[in-house]
Image: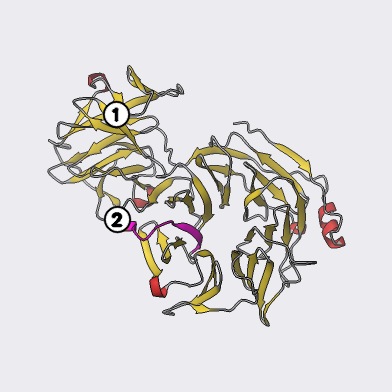
Amino acid sequence: MTMPERSRKLPRFPQLASIVVCCLLGNALAQIPVRLGDPRPVGVSGQPVGIAGSAFDVWVAYSRSMAWFPRLGKSSPRWYGTSDGLPPEGIASLCHDETTQSLWITSTGGRSLRWSQGLESAQESTPPPSGCQSRIAVATSVASLPGLRPSLAGWVQIGSELSPPDGKRQRVLSAMVLDGRELWLATDLGVWTGNAATGRIEPLPLGPVEPCAKSALVDSAGNFWLTGCHGTVSLVDASGQFRGAFSTDDSRYSDLRDARVVGASGGGEGVWVSVVDGMVRLDRTGVRERWMGRKAPFGGRVVSSSRLRDTLWVATENSILCKKDGDKSFRTDLPPWRVPGGVRRIMASPAGVLVATTDGFWWKGSHGWGRPAFVDSASPQAAWVAAQESRSPWRVVWSDGRGVRVDTLPGFGGGTGRWTTALPIHDLAFDATGMVHLAMDGSWSVWNPRTNEHRDWSAGLGMSGPVRAVAPSAERILLAGESGASTVKISPYAPGQSAR
């Protein structure tokens, strides 16, 4: 796929120190070797290969993933993939057998697997000799479907297709009737359910519960986590596969009121989530740890978290707190600033703890709190957005709203850089190669601080609206905005030694 792009040199700040200027001039004509491909909207899994149902559950299978829907309620489905035992060679079909009370999966290689809903995993097993037997679920050919009446305004049925007002038709591929009355349809773009007698149907969510996303980050295992505009948290695995959503519509996640993902939990999969009553640790199985009520970090809502070795550092709206592993409460670390509020991000590295605020940066090293000379070269500047490399040399990238700057922590080496722009910057992050990714007034930009080159994309990303958040992982980057989210595959890039 060809993507609109542009690559150009950027103006430099005239006040840059000579060492910075040398870094930028060292390879003035270098181009960023970024190649993109496979844009994948979050929640889209390709065409379904089968649908099956039981008294309480419905499953829709795709080539290498499966969505589970509860028949009671209309919550977003839970997704499963090869890490849950699904056949890596692909799924050919599935069915539910009442005699064994099990879902059976047939792979494209002819293997049979038995799905355990309790364990949420599949194991190779011998299928029933007579095949699947079910009185509840009856497969229905598309030709024998009743006249369909989509509940969405402007939608009509045209043969075996559902046609929306914008003309992007959905082709019905599989149909099933449960208990003689409940109709389920799997199309090449979604799942619908309704009344088999009247043909009245409505769509069910396949991806995030909310189409709008306002923030994103990557956990230590490479998974992507999204925060919806209304507080729903969604999980996308490292391969770009949507794995599920966590919403207060589900009673199991009632703690997630006004949820905001604020930092990776450290040491593997999962994130810390700021909620109304404190903060919780969330992984793909659900809420794993709660620090709420009297145990919650105090000083307002949690805005950011970062882990350094055995200590979790937390920034609230008005305070800084920390907690070592095994501690039963947070300890307040009194910051030096006198004006409350304005904390934007907390970042931890082996050299110390760095806090970005609207009153500039503050640093806690071996001698306590102070202004970091390596960031504030002159007067303190507001840091509206900031991010840090997750490994050496632990550089920091930040923006005061008028430009972007990369600074190097003392004792770790690494290059610096600066970029002026008139465009608002909504989010930024380092990738593993030292490139900086930015959500910049609706577009996505990749910037090389060493050469001061950047490349921008505003279309062909699998999204219909502007980019507001970026989260780069090892092989893919997640882009999120008001119209949803998408992952894009990005080619590996290894900068030369002088890039650091």
Q: Nearer the viewer, residue 79 or 299?
A: 299
Where residue 454 sits, quadrant-wise, is top right
Residue at image point 60% right, 67% down: 347
Residue 43 image offset from top left, x and y in percent: 43, 41
Mark 1 residue type: Ser
Q: Is residue 458 left or right of residue 222?
A: right
| Residue position for label 1 | 174
Residue range highlighted in magenta: 253-264
Q: Nearer the viewer, residue 53 or 368?
A: 368
Q: Is residue 115 magenta?
A: no
Mark 2 residue type: Ser
Residue at image point 73% right, 65% down: 408
Q: What label sits on residue 251 in the rendered view?
A: 2
* Cα–Cα gap, marks 2 and 1: 31 Å
Question: Up-down: is 32 above or below 430?
Answer: above
Question: Up-down: is 465 above or below 346?
Answer: above
- The residue furthest bottom is 367
Residue 374 image offset from top left, x and y in percent: 75, 69
